Image: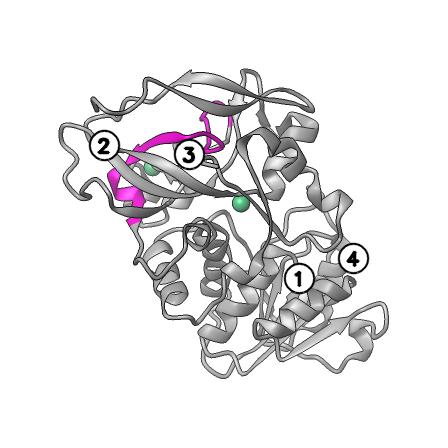
Amino acid sequence: MTDLPRTMRASVLRGVGDIAVEERPVPEPGPREVLVRVHAVGTCGSDTHYYEHGRIGDFVVREPLVLGHEASGVVVARGSHATRHAPGQRVSLEPGVPCSTCEQCRRGRYNLCPDVRFFATPPVDGAFCEYVALDEDFAHPVPDSLSMEAAALVEPLSVGLWACRRGHVAPGARVLVTGAGPVGLMAVQCARAFGASEVVVTDVRPHRLALAAEVGATCALDVRETPLANSGVEPDVLLECSGVGPVAADGIRRVRRAGRVVLVGMGGAEIPLPLAHVQNREIELTGTFRYANTWPTAIGLAASGRVALDRLVSHRFGLDDVAAALTLAARDETAVKAVVLPQE
Ligand SMILES: [Zn+2]
Ligand SMILES: [Zn+2]
């Protein structure tokens, strides 16, 4: 590590609405960790929520915290027992490292590990900084054909991929995606890649709907003009990506008998659901929490061009402007995905 700097610039959340660049030590990689020079970090609704409220549910920011969990970069050093990646390897970072020994980890459901250490979730720092250290198994190699920005967006792509897996989206499936935000746009593309023959997406923002159609939705429905109830849509699978209670309820009412509902969007902690419909039609309903074992597939989909990631990047910011990146969506309705570039 001789030619690496000792300190780096990091964007630190110090309190509600208070974020600033500080000088911090470059992390020392543990024995099985790699040190990664961070090139691109997507911003996410959860980062904005921490910035504006200082907490998400039970996760409370008590100490200064570096946000950002959708990251890519280049391996620049490795710990004494890290052997998987040579320095210079371009990688997409899977931001949650589970304990690997608990019951959920051993079942392969490591996203449900109670002891996971996840970027930008108190007290674990995230990636709005110049360097991060991470378990080598969670730094996934990406081909040179993938941009660093696309490699960062493998994280939200994984959310969409996991939603499709939880929804058992299969060839020929008819899928409804409610909400055309970044995760909805990922879900649309994954559903198409999984072979869905029909992917209807709903939203109320024309710009998002146009983008959804561009990236593969077979029908982009503005529900202000055509309420879902009048649309004739009857999906096998609902991927609920809006997080808005009434939108979720309207979507569930359309799901066909023995269909599946996957709740992806995060909104209110409790929402009213049309339970009689769920019961009478034997609809299977599941939540999703992050993802497990998605990176290799997601990287393959992106590298093969089956999903478009660069197309979703709408704005770019430097490390000094993380606050502007996190508040962009509220100011600019053309915003889709803002990316922070710590090396610029
Ligand atoms: Zn995210
Ligand atoms: Zn575990």
Queried on whether the Cβ of the residue with tag 3 lies below 8 angstroms from ligand 2, the answer reads yes
Mark sitting earlier along the chain (2/4): 2
Relative depth, front residue between 342 and 154: 342
Mark sitting earlier along the chain (2/1): 2
- C-alpha gap between disc 1 and disc 4: 16 Å
Q: Position of residue 266 (x, y in %)?
A: 64, 47
Task: Check if residue 136 falls in the magenta segment.
Answer: yes
Q: Give the residue displayed 25% in from the left and 46% down from the top.
A: 89
Determine if residue 283 is in view.
yes
Q: Quadrant of residue 38?
A: top left
Queried on whether the Cβ of the residue with tag 2 lies below 8 angstroms from ligand 1, the answer reads no
- C-alpha gap between disc 4 and disc 3: 31 Å
Residue type indicated by callout 4: Pro
- Check whether the beta carbons of the residues at disc 2 and disc 1 lie within 8 A of each other: no
Mark sitting earlier along the chain (1/4): 1
Q: Quadrant of residue 16?
A: top right
Q: Which residue is under mark 4?
A: 246
Front label number (3 vs 2)? 2
Q: Residues within 10 Å of mark 3 (few under 14, many from 20)?
A: few
- Check whether the beta carbons of the residues at disc 3 and disc 2 lie within 8 A of each other: no
Residue type indicated by callout 1: Ala
Q: Quadrant of residue 113?
A: top left
Q: Which residue is under mark 2?
A: 77
Q: Which residue is under mark 3?
A: 114
- C-alpha gap between disc 1 and disc 3: 30 Å
Q: Residues within 10 Å of mark 2 (few under 14, many from 20)?
A: many
Query: In the rendered structure, which segment of residues is drawn in magenta?
Result: 122-140
- C-alpha gap between disc 2 and disc 1: 39 Å
